[in-house]
Amino acid sequence: MVLIADDEPAAARLVARSLSVEGFHVATASDGASAIERVWEVHPDVLLLDVNMPGMSGFDVLRELKDTHPVRVIFVTGQESVAAAREGLDLGAEDYIRKPFSGPELAARIRAVLRRRHHLLRGRRRIGAAIADLDNDRILLDGKEIELPRKEWLLLERLIAADGGVVTHDELLMAAFGPAYLGDAAYLRLWIGQLRRRLGVPAWDEGPIRTVPGLGYMLDPGGKVPVRRTRRPKDDTKKARTKKDGTEATRRRQRTKGAPAQSEAGP
């Protein structure tokens, strides 16, 4: 999916038509603010972003998006300024193309950007006890296919695309749920827990999706990062001892209050 953000409707239609001929699915936005809204609606693979738009410029849009959404940006402009091109690339754009350009040239640049992104999101990857089949959007665990809800796929893809880097809470929330959930780390924690379970991670362990306290999460399928903690249940002997100690404490409180003590034999 390619999202075209251009304040000139005729130009946007022309580009959309040429990209459709090249086999791309296309959506459009008429200004910077609507471009940001459309990013969350259609989740484009590439955002074709005009630099000079009223209100929010293309640079402003990229500043708004770069820390919260993993969309790839190609700037489009009629400017000849090298400084403008450098600014866009320094902000994190993947490419920069000047008007006028041909449809095949633009399509080739978009495909190049997609190749750079998809090399991380293709094939099969072992993640803990599971295998992620990224070409077919499925998880294999103990030889069986595990259904993964779309939201969990978006979380997993965002972690994989980070290539071992830390992905913040807000980056994950925006990638899977949109701006309405920003700041809700507790909500994200529930979904990460569900994702871990589907990957075959025991309830007491983090597995390959490591928690980075106060920041977010990172994917560590090779186990290179030291385990931070474990919530694994204690052994049965210790649990029995804890239960007995708790029962004795209850009896002492009851005797102090004058209540009848519990019988060893039960009722």
Image (cartoon, helix red, strand yellow):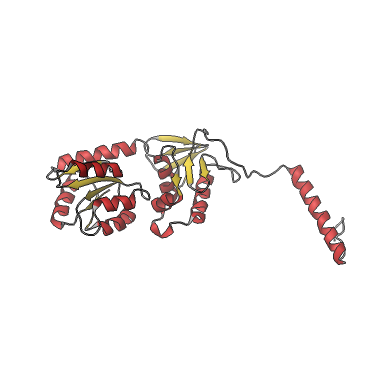
Side of 160 where 90 appears, left or right: left
Using the rendered image of the protein, determine whether residue 113 is visible from the camera's viewpoint: yes
Q: Nearer the viewer, residue 79 or 99?
A: 79
Residue found at x 31% / y 58%: 37
Residue 209 placed where, x, y %?
A: 50, 42
Q: Up-down: is 95 above or below 26?
A: above
Q: Nearer the viewer, residue 238 or 93?
A: 93
Residue 240 placed where, x, y %?
A: 77, 47
Residue 6 placed where, x, y %?
A: 19, 54
**Given the current orientation, which residue lies at the most extreme front position?**
83
Side of 206 where 171 appears, left or right: left
Q: How many dots with numbers?
A: 0
Q: Nearer the viewer, residue 26 or 56?
A: 56
Using the rendered image of the protein, determine whether residue 145 is visible from the camera's viewpoint: no
Quadrant of the rendered image containing residue 41: bottom left
Quadrant of the rendered image containing residue 257: bottom right
Quadrant of the rendered image containing residue 34: bottom left
Residue found at x 28% / y 53%: 60
Residue found at x 86% / y 63%: 256
Quarter of the image where the C terminus is located: bottom right
Side of 146 where 86 appears, left or right: left
Residue 74 placed where, x, y %?
A: 24, 44
